[in-house]
Amino acid sequence: MSDAQNARIQTPLARVRGLGSARDGTAHFWQIRVTAIAALLLTPIFLAVLVTLVGADHATVKRIVGHPAIAVALLLILGATLQHMRLGMQVIIEDYVHSEGNKVVLLMLNTFFTVLVGAACAFAVLKLSLGA
């Protein structure tokens, strides 16, 4: 489709603002779907570990989480879930916050919050798994 044809399809406001397809919506769509599938596949492992650890003492938790496969699975579900959460909140913020200043601040806070939670959770898993 030529630029002239594309301009006729846009609304007058979009033509004035110069806004059009950002050409990255598909990537965002697929990132959300892939992180959802990854979290879905890893959830049974997480639940099995969680049920096993209910009521366990600290030494048992360290032994189970210290197994390399369990630690890696926990870190993977942590990463997939947090990335999925960040992307989902990004969509909500972009769709429902109309002030550009507020939108930028909230998107930054969304990323900072996700990184902070991820770092704290990863630290806990690594501390338990590495026996520190």
Image (tube, helix red, strand yellow):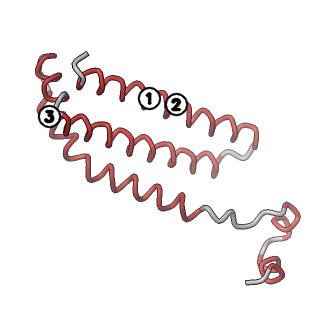
| Mark toward the start of the polypeptide (1 vs 3) | 3
Q: Amino acid at mark 3?
A: Val
| SS at circle 3 | helix
Instruction: Please report the residue visible at 56 percent of the width from the left and 36 percent of the height from the top.
Output: 110
* Residue topped by disc 1: 117
Using the image, determine if residue 8 lies above or below residue 35. Answer: below
Instruction: Please report the residue visible at 79 percent of the width from the left and 83 percent of the height from the top.
Output: 5
Instruction: Please report the residue visible at 14 percent of the width from the left and 34 percent of the height from the top.
Output: 51
| SS at circle 1 | helix
Res. 51 mark: 3
Q: Amino acid at mark 2?
A: Phe
* Residue topped by disc 2: 113
Asked if marks 2 and 3 touch (Cβ < 8 Å), the reply is no
Using the image, determine if residue 6 lies above or below residue 99. Answer: below
Q: x, y percentage for residue 56?
A: 11, 21
For the N terminus, the quadrant is bottom right
| SS at circle 2 | helix
Q: Quadrant of residue 48?
A: top left
| Mark toward the start of the polypeptide (2 vs 3) | 3
For the residues marked 2 and 3, what is the alpha-carbon distance in whole angstroms?
Answer: 28 Å
Q: Nearer the viewer, residue 61 or 7?
A: 61
Asked if marks 2 and 1 touch (Cβ < 8 Å), the reply is yes
